[in-house]
Amino acid sequence: MAGKVFFSVSMSLDGFSAPEQRDQDPKLERWMAQWMELQAWIFPLRFFRENLKLGEGGEQGRDNDIARETFERTGASILGRRMFDFGERAWPAEAPFHTPVFVLTHNRRDPWERPGGTTFHFVDDGIHRALERAREAAGDRDVRIAGGSETILQYVNAGLVDEFSIALAPVLFGSGTRLFDGVDASKVALEPIRSEASTRVTHLTYSVRPR
Amino acid sequence: MAGKVFFSVSMSLDGFSAPEQRDQDPKLERWMAQWMELQAWIFPLRFFRENLKLGEGGEQGRDNDIARETFERTGASILGRRMFDFGERAWPAEAPFHTPVFVLTHNRRDPWERPGGTTFHFVDDGIHRALERAREAAGDRDVRIAGGSETILQYVNAGLVDEFSIALAPVLFGSGTRLFDGVDASKVALEPIRSEASTRVTHLTYSVRPR
């Protein structure tokens, strides 16, 4: 049985999945501070520490289980080019995917194998083809559209996303990158699957249906 | 003991508290359809039917309790002028507030008493003065900033809101009036108080703190 196609991101209460673009914002400190607030629920988790080999310890509990479940269901990921470029500088050598990752790009490049099981494949023939290859690689596990939000929206608007999860953070950004900016609302209906509050965020899961 | 100042609105997952402005949208049907989707959790409730005298019946359960609690805690409401203008045409003679309502306006007008306990008072000397009068009228009950979103944001940005609740609806609008558009994010910190899912929406409650 084929897996699902999903995304899972943190979002501010006013709908932003990232602070204002770094290259438009002279205050990198402010960007980092906002980004840390958005992701604040993840850093203390045992799973996060394990996955990035930051050492022992970390919190257990429902947030941790959810982060681990999201990781474990994922057989392959799809990344937009800009998120890859950013991550290429930010991730440790042992990149945090530990699965095949398909990067949407216009430039051909040989696969890039990292220690720990992550291999980046560069796909220059469109989002459908990238998904085909990701599905094949994932087997019966799920394909995660890992981001950024522009890539996520391309897949949502093409009707290719089955479900998604949002960790809704108790923070207002006022500006930044809106997760759903450009969504084709006339085509997308949502069905709530689960809503679960932890002490830090509310985890919302929806399935996506054509309208 | 003085009551709290709060607001309570329905919001789409992408952050809209109203569909695109009616007077900019030639398709009133579409506006109504979106608005109905946003408020869909309210119409079937027993409290909603009671409050508007629509007759017997209606659903009980947690959504209904929340709608009733919101009504019962409210000792006075504050309305922006545009929302009042809209409501003046839309509400039945027995307007749904059943308490004093303070309308922010630039035009003097005598108080307008409606059957069923709603009296509209027109305040032309600013949001602080309107709140003073509403607090006085509310006694130890709470003051609700009833809307629209522009009025809500004026009070949030002035540091005058203690807490708020959002009924997060499983719908994407893509366009419309954003609840938090113009929020002064550098001054507003949120603390999650409660998050509770019903079958139709997720009820989120936050308290507001200065940053």
Image (cartoon, coloured by chain):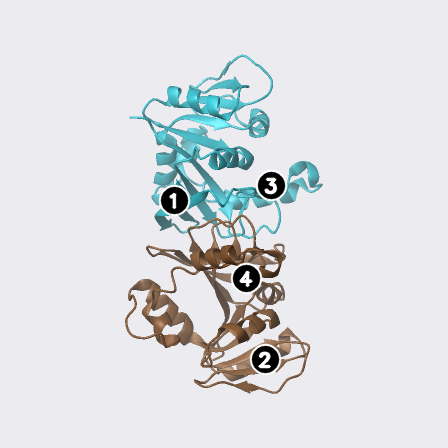
Chain colours: A brown, B cyan
**Residue with the mark numbered 2:** A132
Query: In 3D space, how far apart are the residues under numbered discs 2 and 3 (Cα atoms)?
Result: 39 Å
**Residue with the mark numbered 1:** B205
Image mark 2: chain? A
Query: In 3D space, how far apart are the residues under numbered discs 3 and 1 (Cα atoms)?
Result: 27 Å
Secondary structure under tag 4 reads strand
Q: Nearer the viewer, mark 1 or mark 2?
A: 1
* Mark 2, other Cα within 10 Å: few <14 / some 14–19 / many ≥20: few
The disc placed on residue B32 is 3
Q: Are dots 4 and 1 in contact, CB under 8 Å?
A: no
Q: Nearer the viewer, mark 3 or mark 1?
A: 1
Q: Can residue B55 be seen in this view?
A: no
Image mark 1: chain? B
The image position of residue A16, as x and y in percent, is 53, 55
Q: Which residue is drawn at 34% across and 63% down?
A: A63
Query: In 3D space, how far apart are the residues under numbered discs 4 and 1 (Cα atoms)?
Result: 28 Å
| Left or right of B88 on screen, residue B116 | left
Q: Which of marks 4 and 1 is in front?
A: 1
Q: Are dots 2 and 3 in contact, CB under 8 Å?
A: no
Question: Is B98 placed above or below A27 here?
Answer: above
Q: Earlier in the sequence, mark 4 or mark 2?
A: 2
Q: Residue at x 57, y 22 (%)?
A: B105
Secondary structure under tag 3 reads helix
Secondary structure under tag 2 reads helix
Query: In 3D space, how far apart are the residues under numbered discs 4 and 2 (Cα atoms)?
Result: 20 Å
Labels 2, 3: one chain: no
**Residue with the mark numbered 4:** A209
